[in-house]
Image (cartoon, rainbow, N blue to C red):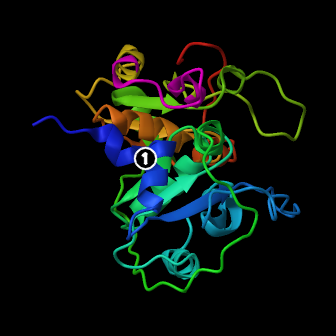
């Protein structure tokens, strides 16, 4: 029997609308990536009916640290506290969306599954596809009833910096940042270096997307990642700048049935240690 991996990871706008009209709808989370100290600008703005706001920096990440990076994983007890406030229950199905083609929502998709929630999907193409479909929007933020979800850590694979260095040489380590950040170059004194982990292969997360902002078809993704060495025959891991866009690559790989580990600390953790080497240029190095 062929497994429809895409349907387990993504939901279309029309599909979500049908589910929201059903007797037991999923919980919808609007993932926001407000910068630390910034004032939220989304309150009162149009949203999918019933969507609960989730602040990525405050609720889907822990406190920054040198070795943990700028967006480390949250403490599981804190994540559970937030998830209950969002209204998540033990049997909840969850759909996450953002305003940036799932490049932010993928972090929520990954973190919630890492914490043990089995049924988490992304709205393919994000809020833009919901609008394009002419589906209802509202301005009011909901006040969900507190949930009773119980979370446990470690349900998805992750690696640290040492393992990332080994993966780059002995397996496949993908870098999901935009090409200029991967290529790197000189920086002013006192700033973190630019470049990539030696041996890592460039795989920009935006390459997962078609012109309409949705994930491209499985055949194209398989060809794209197969050309980079991620063909399902060996281990794969992904990193990015701070552990956000890497989860988009992990989702794309999952669509074609390939499991990949996350280096959550990513470049923010790697580059904080002056003892770690930095490769510069378009080749893995």
Going 54% across and 26% down the picture, which residue do you hit? Answer: 209
Rendered location of residue 257, percent (x, y): 27, 35
> Which residues, given as a range, are shown in magenta?
205-220
Residue lying farthest to the left in this orientation: 1
* Lateral position of residue 26 relative to residue 232, left or right: right
Rendered location of residue 13, percent (x, y): 51, 44
- Tell me if residue 209 is in the magenta stretch: yes
Q: Is residue 52 above or below residue 99?
A: below
Q: Is residue 226 above or below residue 70?
A: above
Q: Helix, strand or loop at disc 1?
A: helix
| Residue 22 appears in the picture as rendered | yes
For label 1, the residue is 15
Rendered location of residue 5, percent (x, y): 29, 40
* Lateral position of residue 122 relative to residue 22, left or right: right
Going 51% across and 27% down the picture, which residue do you hit? Answer: 208
- Tell me if residue 182 is in the magenta stretch: no
Dividing the picture into quarters, in which one does residue 150 lie?
bottom left
Rendered location of residue 260, percent (x, y): 37, 41
Tell me if mark 1 has few (under 14), some (14-19) or many (20+) residues whose alpha carbon lies within 10 angstroms of its own.
Answer: few
Q: Is residue 197 above or below residue 163?
A: above
Depth check: give the residue in front, 84 or 199.
84
| Residue 72 appears in the picture as rendered | no
Q: Quadrant of the N terminus?
A: top left
Depth check: give the residue in front, 21 or 121.
21
Going 53% across and 62% down the picture, which residue do you hit? Answer: 28
Depth check: give the residue in front, 114 or 188.
114
Q: Is residue 161 above or below residue 57?
A: above
């Amino acid at each position: 029997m062929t497994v429809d991996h895409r349907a387990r990871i993504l939901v279309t706008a029309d599909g979500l609308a049908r589910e929201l009209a059903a007797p037991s709808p999923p919980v919808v989370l609007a993932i926001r990536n407000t910068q630390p100290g910034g004032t939220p600008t989304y309150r009162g703005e149009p949203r999918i009916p019933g969507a609960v706001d989730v602040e990525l920096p405050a609720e889907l990440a822990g406190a920054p640290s040198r070795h943990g990076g700028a967006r480390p994983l949250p403490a599981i007890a804190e994540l559970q506290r937030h998830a209950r406030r969002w209204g998540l229950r033990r049997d909840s199905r969850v759909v996450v969306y953002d305003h940036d083609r799932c490049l932010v929502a993928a972090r929520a998709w990954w973190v919630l599954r890492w914490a043990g929630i089995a049924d988490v999907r992304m709205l393919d193409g994000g809020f833009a596809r919901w609008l394009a479909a002419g589906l209802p929007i509202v301005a009011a933020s909901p006040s969900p009833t507190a949930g009773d979800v119980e979370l446990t850590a470690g349900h998805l694979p992750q690696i640290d910096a040492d393992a990332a260095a080994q993966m780059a040489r002995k397996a496949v380590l993908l870098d999901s940042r935009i090409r200029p950040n991967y290529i790197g170059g000189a920086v002013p004194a006192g700033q973190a270096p630019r470049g990539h982990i030696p041996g890592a292969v460039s795989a920009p997360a935006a390459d997962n997307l078609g012109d309409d902002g949705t994930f491209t078809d499985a055949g194209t993704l398989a060809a794209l990642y197969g050309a980079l060495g991620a063909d399902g025959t060996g281990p794969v891991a992904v990193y990015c700048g701070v552990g956000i866009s890497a989860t988009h690559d992990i989702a794309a790989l999952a669509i074609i049935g390939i499991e990949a580990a996350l280096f959550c600390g990513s470049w923010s953790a790697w580059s904080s240690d002056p003892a770690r080497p930095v490769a510069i240029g378009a080749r893995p190095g």
